[in-house]
Image (cartoon, rainbow, N blue to C red):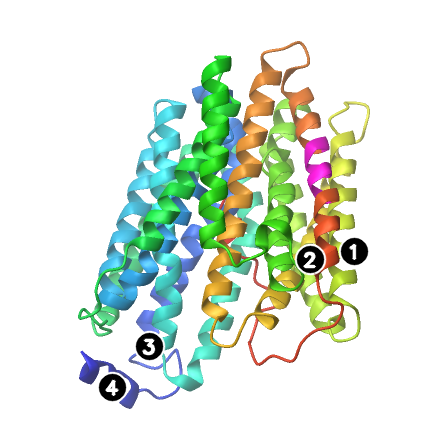
């Protein structure tokens, strides 16, 4: 295996587009684009899905199931890629992601849709680690920066057009094709990528360590019990499930997170804690924005897609702006400014649930929120990596990703409970969206308290951080 890897490097010309690497490059780009489009499009698809299949009470689970399964997939795949090499985890991940697309696209009920989303999430979790390992092992050293930049662009294109395109597909073809239409791309990605991946081996002498994978499963079970308990009508069962789930989630987070994260201790723990709260608040509203625009305000999915696209564009703008001011302005101030902008965006969107408010304010509001997350999300990533102990950057990155995924899952799941219960009452789903938005404003306030633990000035670091590309947490 080692000789095969050496031969790959020896024959490299230093370009991701040379004869040896071109097919691998195209395959990896498709591998990124497929899940990226799905991640950014599905929020705009769900209102039509619920309208067709029913099951408004499961709305939040369409996102939470993906994220919780994704969390497990990420944790298990990392060790397996090192042990087996990337080819087998890649095939498993792409097969599961494709199977999830098929299940969701053909789902006769909302419950089957949730299963499909969970299968997608697990598969996407496997694939997220494969891309970076391939860049490190399969690309020549001079070309690694090219491939990472291309990966950012592969996320950026769906970010710009994904939600709007999904809206057009939903309005003119049908929501099922947002899922089924990606299957040819997944097949092509496997055909192009797999032959090269087979040349990149692992170290199968390493013992299989499933301890972190088991902890991530227990964390997902705890979060799932918590969310299920919140939506259970039987009071005794609800209390048992909610408390039991909360305790299990707390215990697993203490084991998986750096010490001090749960109390936002100064430095890296505060950054990771704020990151989780940030994602909980932003995506706790972002998930239900299309529902508010289409079902409450009676607008098309295309209009909802414009609001989501505006947020993505401004996210990129915020990240670009950060790259130019981060050395001159306090990390704490930049993050706090971003959180305040998200709060303003949430507040303005909440107003648009009222039919008397012009619908264009929804697009403007989410553009403001997108600028806020662009500033704060990337700043918190920088702070985490800058303050990670030497040699501990991988653990810090994993904890950050875990906080992101769990934040999105809880935000979507809590919103699903609130919106579902409100839908059964006189206020309807619109009242539920307003209540969810107000709750997320409370999370923003809590985030501003956690921000106090961030360092004011940056530390010297050699860690390279992409300032533009949104995280895989957009995979909700």
| Location of mark 1 (residue) | 337
Secondary element type, mark 2? helix
Q: Are marks 4 and 3 in contact (CB under 8 Å)?
A: no
Q: Please tell me whether residue 52 belongs to the stretch shown in magenta.
A: no
Left or right position of 128 against 286? left
Numbered marks: total: 4
- Residue 6: which disc? 4
The residue that appears at 70% across and 52% down in the rendered structure is 450
Left or right position of 359 against 222? right
Ranked by sequence position, the earlier of labels 3 and 1 is 3
The residue that appears at 64% across and 15% down in the rendered structure is 428
Q: Count residues near mark 4 (Cα–Cα under 10 Å), then give few for <14, some for 14-19, many for 20+.
A: some
Secondary element type, mark 3? helix
Q: Marks 3 and 1, how far apart in space?
A: 39 Å
Q: Marks 4 and 2, how far apart in space?
A: 41 Å
- Residue 337, percent from left and from top: 78, 55
Ranked by sequence position, the earlier of labels 1 and 4 is 4
- Residue 137: which disc? 3
Q: Nearer the viewer, residue 17 or 6?
A: 6
Q: Nearer the viewer, residue 215 or 357?
A: 215
| Location of mark 2 (residue) | 376
Q: Marks 3 and 2, how far apart in space?
A: 32 Å
**Which range of residues does the magenta coloring cover?**
438-444
- Residue 60, percent from left and from top: 51, 31
Q: Marks 2 and 1, how far apart in space?
A: 8 Å
Ranked by sequence position, the earlier of labels 2 and 1 is 1
Left or right position of 178 against 190? right
């Amino acid at each position: 295996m080692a000789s095969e890897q050496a031969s790959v490097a020896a024959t490299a010309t230093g370009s991701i587009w040379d004869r040896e690497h071109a097919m691998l490059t195209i395959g990896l780009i498709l591998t990124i684009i497929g899940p990226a489009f799905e991640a950014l499009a599905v929020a705009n698809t769900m209102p039509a899905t619920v309208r067709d299949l029913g099951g408004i009470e499961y709305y939040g689970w369409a996102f939470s199931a993906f994220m919780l399964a994704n969390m497990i997939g990420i944790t298990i795949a990392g060790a397996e890629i090192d042990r087996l090499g990337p080819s087998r985890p890649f095939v498993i991940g792409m097969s599961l992601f494709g199977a999830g697309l098929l299940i969701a696209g053909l789902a006769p009920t909302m419950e089957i849709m949730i299963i499909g989303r969970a299968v997608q999430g697990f598969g996407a979790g496997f694939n997220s680690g494969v891309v970076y390992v391939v860049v490190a092992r399969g690309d020549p050293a001079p070309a690694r920066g090219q491939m990472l930049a291309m990966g950012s662009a592969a996320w950026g294109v769906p970010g710009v057009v994904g939600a709007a395109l999904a809206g057009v597909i939903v309005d003119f073809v049908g929501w099922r094709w947002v899922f089924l239409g990606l299957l040819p791309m997944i097949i092509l990605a496997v055909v192009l990528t797999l032959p090269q991946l087979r040349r990149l081996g692992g170290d199968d002498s390493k013992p299989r360590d499933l301890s972190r994978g088991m902890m991530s499963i227990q964390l997902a079970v705890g979060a799932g019990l918590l969310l299920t308990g919140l939506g259970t009508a039987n009071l005794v069962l609800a209390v048992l499930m909610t408390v039991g789930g909360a305790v299990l989630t707390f215990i697993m987070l203490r084991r998986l997170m750096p010490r001090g994260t749960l109390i936002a201790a100064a430095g890296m723990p505060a950054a990771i804690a704020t990151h989780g709260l940030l994602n909980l608040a932003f995506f706790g509203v972002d998930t239900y924005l299309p529902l508010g625009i289409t079902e409450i305000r009676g607008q098309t999915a295309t209009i909802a897609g414009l609001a989501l696209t505006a947020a993505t564009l401004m996210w990129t703008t915020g990240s670009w702006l950060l790259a130019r001011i981060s050395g001159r302005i306090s990390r704490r101030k930049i993050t706090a400014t971003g959180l305040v902008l998200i709060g303003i965006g949430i507040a303005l969107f909440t107003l648009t649930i009222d039919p008397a408010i012009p619908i264009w304010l929804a697009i403007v509001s989410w553009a403001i929120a997108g600028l806020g997350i662009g500033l704060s999300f990337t700043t918190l990533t920088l702070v985490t990596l800058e303050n990670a102990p030497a040699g501990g950057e991988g653990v810090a990155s994993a904890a950050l990703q875990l906080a992101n995924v769990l934040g999105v899952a809880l935000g979507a799941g809590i919103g699903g409970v609130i919106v579902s219960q409100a839908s059964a009452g006189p206020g309807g789903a619109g009242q539920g969206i307003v209540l969810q938005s107000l709750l997320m404003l409370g999370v923003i306030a809590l985030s501003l308290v956690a921000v106090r633990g961030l360092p004011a000035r940056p530390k010297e670091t050699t860690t390279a951080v992409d300032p533009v590309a949104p995280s895989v947490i957009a995979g909700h």
